Structure formats: C-alpha cells, structure tokens
Image (cartoon, grey):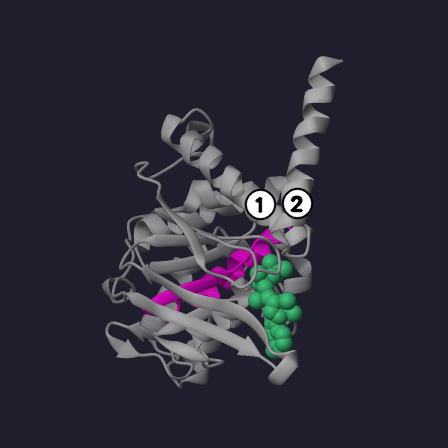
C-alpha cells in the first residue's frame, strides 16, 4: 500500500471503534418487479452469507441482478419473498450499520477532500477531536494528505475513489457494501486501487461485500467468491480463495490457488454469459457454445 510519509501517523493503527463488524445472512430471497404478465423476476431463491471480518466478492454477468441485491441489502427495497439479517436481526430499512459505496461518485464537488470525508460526522453533529483524528488517519491511509484542500474536480479518478472510501469508513459501518466502485477507471488506476483497498481491508478487517464484473479484481480481493447465475440471480457457486494476506498483485499472478480459482470461475461465468447472450434460452446458448467450439477447432486446424 502506498502512503504519504508521515511518521506521526504511521505509528497509529486502525482505531478500535473501526473494528466492530457484522455478519449478513441472505435467506431464500427473491425479488420481482412489475405485475401480471409484466412481472420480471430479477433475484430468485438466493441464499448466501457475508461472513464477519471477511471480504466477500460477488461476480456475475452484466444485468444479472447484482445491484438489485445491493439495494435489498442496503434496505432501500424489500424482497418479494425471503429474508435478510444483520447479526441475526432482520434488515427492513436503510441503516448506518450498512454503508454502500456506489459506482457513481457521491463526493460533493463544492467541498474539499477533507470536508467531504468529515461530511458524515458533521451531519450527525459529531465534529469532535476524535472524528478529526480519524479523518487525518484515513486521509493518510488513502494517500491523500497532500490533497486535503483540493476539490473533487482537481483530483484524478483514482483519488476521488480513495476519498470516497475514506468518506465511507469514517462512519464506521458494521458492513461495507461496494457496488463496482472502481468501474470506469483506467487499468493502471484500477490496479492501484485494488492495492489501496486491500490494504484498508487488511488493516480494518471490516466485514465487506464487494460486487464486480472484473475477474482479476475479484480474485485479488476476495476471501470468498460468489459466482452468480444469469438473471434471475442466484448463487451458482461459492469458491474460497484461501490465499494469505497481505496480497500483492505481482505474487497473485504466479499463485497456483489463485489461478485455479480463476479458471474455475471463468468457466462458470462463461456458461452464464452464454445464457445471457442468447437471451436466456438454453437451446440458443448450446448453439452459441457449439459454434464457438467449432470456430476454435477450425482456427487450430489452420
Ligand atoms: N425497479 C426496477 N423495475 C424493473 N426492472 C428492474 C428494476 N431494477 C432493476 N430491474 C431490472 O433488473 C435487471 C437486473 O438489473 P441490475 O441493475 O440489478 O443488474 P446488475 O447485475 O447490477 O447489472 P450491471 O452489472 O450491468 O450493473 C435488469 O434487467 C433491470 O432492467
């Protein structure tokens, strides 16, 4: 992890109050929109656990229902059937115990980096020394101490995402939920973000749920990988990524276990993407797959 050099802060560890964390259980959840012949089932009989102090990553084809699941977990919408609990208590509405970092920036462009990070505590009337210390600590952890007085448009895309992470973490949620937070960044900024984010997770061990469509991001970050089906979303497979932390990108490339999981995940995602591509028809998916295999054979034969 890259940090500004500041001996005073580097002696500090993650404050204790940032360590509390929760466990979410999703039990046979389904979600449909519309009525009658216009009903669309987006999530179907979906069950999984977001384990305490672990980083659970969900990956699935585009449009399979991942963001819908996030809205359910955040309490913005209710499931059609099934239930969700946080520390055994039903999730029925939004709460400070779950914080969502969305794809789109939520930074206020008229506030400096520091003021953006302090937004949550100030909104709660908690502009205390403790909150200010925490803001300094987080600024340092995301490598933005030197940019504290800059406004979001003066920051690069990666810096904005780092400010966003600090702005979320200062609120000390039980569970951090991240919906493709690095989507749209260029490849190099993205890889840098993975290392920053993994570093934050390693130190805080806050229960986290991270949604992505990027297989390398998923493998690098996850303790546990949930592979989703094509719409309606269900968990197709759960893969444990038992690779020790802290992880470095350079080590992951040559890590046998990481590569094994990647191949397994890719095969499953390929199958699900095929179904998505062919509009959900198994017959059409089989056709597309058979065609692809034949095309490959033909290429090899040439
Ligand atoms: N409020 C709604 N009413 C009707 N359909 C909806 C609603 N919200 C989502 N959907 C449908 O549910 C499907 C899944 O959408 P969702 O955004 O959850 O998928 P996703 O996996 O997050 O997609 P992406 O990876 O592209 O962000 C889409 O077909 C979408 O049109």
Q: Quadrant of residue 50?
A: bottom left
Q: Is mark 2 within 8 Å of ligand 1?
A: no
Residue 284 x/y as whole percent: 68, 48
SS class, disc 1 = helix
Q: Is mark 1 within 8 Å of ligand 1?
A: no
Relative to 245, say whether 160 is above or below. Answer: below
Q: Is residue 1 visible?
A: no
Residue 24 x/y as whole percent: 31, 67
Name the residue beneath numbered marker 1: 190
In the rendered structure, are the residues bearing label 1 and label 2 in contact, judged by CB atoms less than 8 Å apart? yes
User: 275 or 118, which is in the foreground?
Assistant: 275
Residue drawn at the location 46% of the way across and 83% of the way down: 123
Ligand 1 sits in which quadrant?
Answer: bottom right
Quadrant position of the C terminus in the picture: top right
SS class, disc 2 = loop
Task: Say left or right for 136 vs 281.
Answer: left
User: 197 or 11, which is in the foreground?
Assistant: 197
Q: Residue furthest top?
A: 302
Q: Residue furthest right?
A: 302
Packing grade of label 1 (10 A; few <14, some 14-19, many >=20) is some
Residue 255 x/y as whole percent: 40, 27
Question: What span is colored magenta in the figure?
Answer: 158-185
Quadrant position of the N terminus in the picture: top left
């Amino acid at each position: 992890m890259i940090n500004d050099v500041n001996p005073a802060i580097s002696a500090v560890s993650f404050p204790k109050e940032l360590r509390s964390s929760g466990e979410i259980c999703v039990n046979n959840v389904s979600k449909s929109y519309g009525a009658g012949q216009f009903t669309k089932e987006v999530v179907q009989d979906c069950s999984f656990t977001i384990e305490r102090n672990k980083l659970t990553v969900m990956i699935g084809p585009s449009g399979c229902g991942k963001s819908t699941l996030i809205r359910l977990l955040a309490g913005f919408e209710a499931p059609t059937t099934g239930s969700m609990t946080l520390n055994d208590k039903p999730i029925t509405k939004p709460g400070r115990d779950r914080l969502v970092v969305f794809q789109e920036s939520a930074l206020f462009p008229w506030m400096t980096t520091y003021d953006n990070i302090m937004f949550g505590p100030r909104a709660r009337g908690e502009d205390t020394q403790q909150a200010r210390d925490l803001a300094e600590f987080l600024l340092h952890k995301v490598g933005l101490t030197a940019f504290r007085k800059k406004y979001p448009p003066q920051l690069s895309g990666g810096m904005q995402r780092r400010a966003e992470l600090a702005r979320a973490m200062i609120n000390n949620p039980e569970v951090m939920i991240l919906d493709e937070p690095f989507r749209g960044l260029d490849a190099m900024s993205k890889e840098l973000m993975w290392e920053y984010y993994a570093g934050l997770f390693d130190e805080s061990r806050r229960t986290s749920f991270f949604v992505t469509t990027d297989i390398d991001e998923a493998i690098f970050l996850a303790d546990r990988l949930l592979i989703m089906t094509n719409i309606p979303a269900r968990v197709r497979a759960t893969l444990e990524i038992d690779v020790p932390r802290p992880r470095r990108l350079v080590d992951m490339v040559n890590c046998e276990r990481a590569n094994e999981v990647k191949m397994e995940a890719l095969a499953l995602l390929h199958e699900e993407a095929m179904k998505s591509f062919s509009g959900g028809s198994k017959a059409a998916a089989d056709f597309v797959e058979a065609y692809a295999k034949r095309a490959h054979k033909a290429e090899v034969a040439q």
